[in-house]
Amino acid sequence: MGDAEFDIRPYIEALKMNLSGLPSGTIISKIQPSRSNCLAEESSVIWKEGKVVQDLCLRLRNVECGEVELQFQWIDLPGAKGL
């Protein structure tokens, strides 16, 4: 099935920022594909409709071919501790 690796730190750092005054669609940071990650294309952390969102397209390793697309979005669960 393959595997992929990526760095979640840019997303977590954006979550810790006070972004409430920014317009929806503002790019917080961009992550470029490199040998140290499995990104198939540039990934951006975006402030969208009051939430921090990141879309990723990851190239799978240890398989002949394949990619997986992910979207990160923080969800507050009742009773859970926040960042």
Image (cartoon, helix red, strand yellow):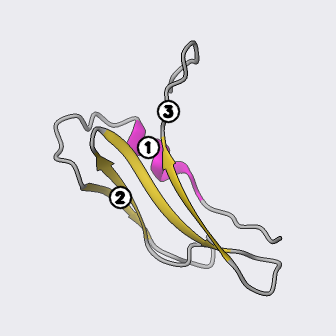
The reply to whether the magenta stretch includes residue 33 is no
Q: Is residue 30 left or right of residue 6?
A: left
**Horizontal relation, residue 24 to residue 36: left or right:** left
Q: Mark 3 points at which residue?
A: 75
State the SS at label 1.
Answer: helix
Q: Nearer the viewer, residue 33 or 62?
A: 62
Q: Percent x, y for residue 50?
A: 28, 38
Mark toward the start of the polypeptide (2 vs 1):
1
Q: Mark 1 points at which residue?
A: 13
Write the start and end of the magenta stretch as one range: 7-15
Query: Given the image, on which type of amino acid does mark 3 rest?
Result: Ile
Element type at marker 3? loop
Q: What element carries label 2?
A: strand
- Image position, residue 39 (x, y; %): 56, 73
**Is the residue under label 2 in contact with that under label 3 (CB below 8 Å)?**
no
Residue mark closest to the camera, 3 vs 2: 3
Q: Nearer the viewer, mark 1 or mark 3?
A: 3
Residue at image point 46% right, 60% down? 55
Measure the alpha-carbon separation of dots 3 and 2: 20 Å
Residue receiving disc 2: 29
Disc 2 and disc 1 in contact, CB within 8 angstroms: yes
Q: Residue at x 71, y 67 (%)?
A: 4
